[in-house]
Image (cartoon, rainbow, N blue to C red):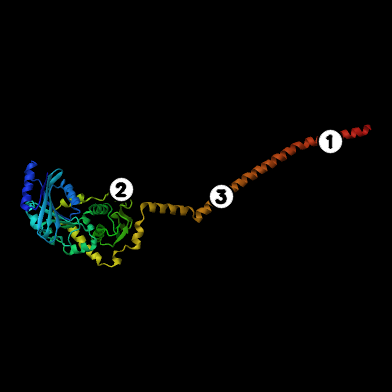
């Protein structure tokens, strides 16, 4: 059900919500909280779609506030949506003129009682979310530094104005990366001497990942650029080789631990609704995010040498396959050593001597056989010669 309200008030919107609920046959509210989305006209459709998809896991009342400040009399147009595939309730609010400068006056009467409020800025968000008129209403305040032009400057400003409950989608995107790297050190406890984060240029999540690693490990963390998409690799250097998580295509990553075969890991880039669903699962402050923000500010003031991995650590980036190839090359080199060559040459000379000896024996045997044959023929030849001589004498006497 969709109810359009023009030049309306918060009271009329609340009555329309109650009427729509009763028409749908569900007078009771089964929603867990209120999600306030602060967005512009161009991107409100995608933001509402993401909030409704997240509502399938966390049914909520979604208030999408489109602020149109300007001169003139303030006005409020609304669109109430209940049912038709929407798990909770959705209200599209367009605030015009002077009313856009005080949006909390419209939003407060529409908040669900005794339930948490989450304020989300899909377009980036203010530098101090808790100081924003709508941000002050929320228990959780969600920004997205990836949508800003200067993410590092935004992080520095939010670190200075941090209030428990602040978080950012750039941090939410790192949840599977952080979980896998922490699990790797649980499986393979070793000393880490350095780390590196490889990502597309200007990636906001990569800045937070580098700050988190340096804060937790206390080692230099170097950032390098790639063609993306997003973060493409995270490596921790150890004496036995790197612990690496490499994702060149944005979908499937390769998880490498020294001494173990590489494993494929499903690590696709998550959509906005999945990120919002994760943030709706917890209402307590994210202390690790706060610490990582502080470490990021420290990294900004560090010299370049403190954020550079040494050459000795980088040499340990050989993969298991490269090491196996090196071992094979060493074995081949040993086979070609002078000692083994001399041994092989000695074997060749022995074979040649044996061949020569066999030929000599055969030659001697042939000579002996020829001599024996000659010796047998000699008496017969002698008798023939004597007989011939006697014959000659008898012939001479007769004549």
Q: Give the answer, above or below, for where 389 lies relative to 68.
A: above
In this rendering, the label closer to the viewer, 3 or 1 = 3
Instruction: Return the x and y of residue 226 as percentages of the image width and height.
Output: 32, 57
Closer-to-camera residue (54/236): 54
Residue located at (84% from left, 35% from top): 386
Going from the N terminus, do you reach mark 3 or mark 1 first?
A: 3
> Callout 3: helix, strand or loop?
helix
Q: Do the residues labelled 3 and 1 touch (CB within 8 Å)?
A: no
Closer-to-camera residue (377/343): 343
What's the distance in space between the residues labelled 1 and 2, CA to CA? Answer: 105 Å
Q: Mark 2 points at which residue?
A: 264
Closer-to-camera residue (155/308): 155
Looking at the figure, which quarter contains the C terminus? top right
Q: How crowded is mark 3: few (under 14 residues within 10 Å), some or many (20 or more)?
A: few
> Callout 2: helix, strand or loop?
strand
Q: Mark 1 points at which residue?
A: 386
Q: Give the answer, above or below, for where 194 lies relative to 372.
A: below
Residue extending furthest top? Answer: 398
Judge left or right: residue 343 versus residue 375: left
Q: Where residue 20 is drawn, which disc sits there? A: none
> Callout 1: helix, strand or loop?
helix
In this rendering, the label closer to the viewer, 1 or 2 = 2
Instruction: Return the x and y of residue 35 as percentages of the image width and height.
Output: 13, 52
Instruction: Return the x and y of residue 298 as percentages of the image width and height.
Output: 23, 65
Residue 387 position by quadrant: top right
Judge left or right: residue 277 versus residue 353: left
Q: Mark 3 points at which residue?
A: 348
Going from the N terminus, do you reach mark 2 or mark 3 first?
A: 2
Residue located at (30% from left, 66% from top): 304
């Amino acid at each position: 059900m969709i109810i359009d309200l023009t030049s309306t008030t918060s009271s009329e919107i609340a009555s329309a919500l109650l009427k729509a609920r009763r028409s749908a046959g569900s007078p009771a509210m089964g929603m867990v909280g209120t999600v306030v989305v602060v967005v512009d006209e161009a991107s409100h459709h995608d933001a509402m779609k993401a909030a409704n998809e997240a509502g399938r896991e966390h049914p909520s009342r979604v208030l999408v506030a489109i602020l149109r400040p300007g001169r003139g009399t303030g006005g409020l147009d609304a669109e109430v949506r209940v049912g038709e595939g929407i798990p909770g309730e959705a209200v599209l609010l367009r605030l015009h003129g002077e009313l856009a400068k005080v949006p909390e006056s419209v939003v407060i009467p529409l908040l669900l009682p005794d339930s948490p409020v989450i304020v989300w800025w899909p377009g980036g968000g203010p530098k101090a979310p808790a100081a924003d008129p709508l941000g002050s209403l929320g228990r959780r305040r969600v920004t997205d530094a990836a949508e800003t032009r200067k993410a590092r400057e935004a992080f520095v400003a939010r670190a200075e104005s941090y209030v428990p409950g602040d978080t950012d989608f750039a941090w939410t995107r790192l949840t599977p990366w952080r979980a896998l790297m922490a699990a790797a050190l649980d499986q393979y406890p070793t000393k880490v001497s350095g780390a590196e984060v490889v990502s597309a240029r200007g990636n906001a999540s990569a800045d937070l990942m580098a700050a988190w690693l340096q804060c937790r490990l206390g080692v230099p963390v170097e950032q390098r650029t790639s063609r993306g998409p997003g973060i493409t690799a995270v490596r921790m250097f150890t004496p036995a080789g790197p612990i690496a998580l490499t994702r060149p295509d944005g979908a499937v990553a390769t998880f490498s631990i020294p001494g173990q075969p590489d494993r494929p890991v499903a690590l696709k880039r998550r959509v906005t609704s999945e990120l919002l669903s994760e943030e709706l699962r917890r209402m307590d402050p994210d202390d690790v995010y706060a610490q990582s923000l502080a470490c990021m500010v420290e990294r900004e003031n560090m010299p370049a040498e403190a954020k550079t991995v040494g050459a000795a650590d980088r040499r340990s980036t050989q993969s298991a396959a490269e090491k196996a190839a090196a071992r094979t090359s060493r074995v081949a080199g040993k086979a070609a050593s002078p000692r083994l060559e001399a041994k092989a040459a000695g074997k060749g000379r022995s074979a040649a001597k044996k061949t020569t000896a066999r030929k000599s024996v055969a030659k001697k045997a042939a000579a002996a056989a020829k001599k024996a044959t000659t010796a047998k023929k000699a008496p017969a030849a002698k008798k023939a010669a004597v007989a011939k001589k006697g014959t000659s004498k008898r012939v001479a006497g007769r004549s």
